[in-house]
Image (cartoon, helix red, strand yellow):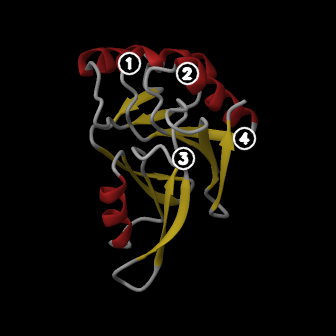
């Protein structure tokens, strides 16, 4: 299973939609948004694309009532999880949060196959040693909104633990 991982869209709906559309064309079946969405309407262009979207807030929450209303209007396509996500996709256990330090801490537990985070606006893929002696993938897609760095997102192949950072044109 392939998924699209994005973060830090900061109200840049066209850029977010372009990344999700490209991910769908590349075979993605779901989207994880690691926070700093800001306005809920940033997600509205994703509804016609048709992929399930899982969202956490970041340090720029925006309007939570508008976000809940948009989720309700999406008929379950968009799900707001609050501060973090704990879910299974493609037979893999994933955790997502906005903050890298929180993500690193959760990766260290060894309870997850993949931990996703954002906030730094810098894309990265590392294997984090766990307390049990294993490794967990800790991934940050950078900022799809292109703040302070070129706009990036990530296409992840969960079956092979392949994480490709992609730039928007």
Of badges 3 and 1, nearer the viewer stands 3
Q: Secondary structure at mark 4?
A: loop
Question: Does 145 sit left or right of 165 as displayed?
Answer: left
Return the residue at label 4: 27
Q: Nearer the viewer, residue 124 or 96?
A: 124
First of labels 1, 4 by sequence position: 4
State how far apart marks 1 and 2 are (Cα): 11 Å
Q: Identify residue for label 1.
A: 40
Q: Which of the two marks, 2 or 3, is nearer to us in this view?
A: 3
Seen as rendered, the residue at the extreme front is 148
Quarter of the picture containing the C terminus is top right
Q: Which residue is mark 2?
A: 46
Q: Earlier in the sequence, mark 3 or mark 4?
A: 4
Instruction: Say which of marks 1 and 4 sits in front.
Output: 1
The residue under label 3 is 141
Identified at 61% across, 37% down, the residue is: 150
Which of the 4 image quarters holds residue 107?
Answer: bottom left
- Residue at coordinates 57% horizontally, 54% vertically from top-left? 90
């Amino acid at each position: 299973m392939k998924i699209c991982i994005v973060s830090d869209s900061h109200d840049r709906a066209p850029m977010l939609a372009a990344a999700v559309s490209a991910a769908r064309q590349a075979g993605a079946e779901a989207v994880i948004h690691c926070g700093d969405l800001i306005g809920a309407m940033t997600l509205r262009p994703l509804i016609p694309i048709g992929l399930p979207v899982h969202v956490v807030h970041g340090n720029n929450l925006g309007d939570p009532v508008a976000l809940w209303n948009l989720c309700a209007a999406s008929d379950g396509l968009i799900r707001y999880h609050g501060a973090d996500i704990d879910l299974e996709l493609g037979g893999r256990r994933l955790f997502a949060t906005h903050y890298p330090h929180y993500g690193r801490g959760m990766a260290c537990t060894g309870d997850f196959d993949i931990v996703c985070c954002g906030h730094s606006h810098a894309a990265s893929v590392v294997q984090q040693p766990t307390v049990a002696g294993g490794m967990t993938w800790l991934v940050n897609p950078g900022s799809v909104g292109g703040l302070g760095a070129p706009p990036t997102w990530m296409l992840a192949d969960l079956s092979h633990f392949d994480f490709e950072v992609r730039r928007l044109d």
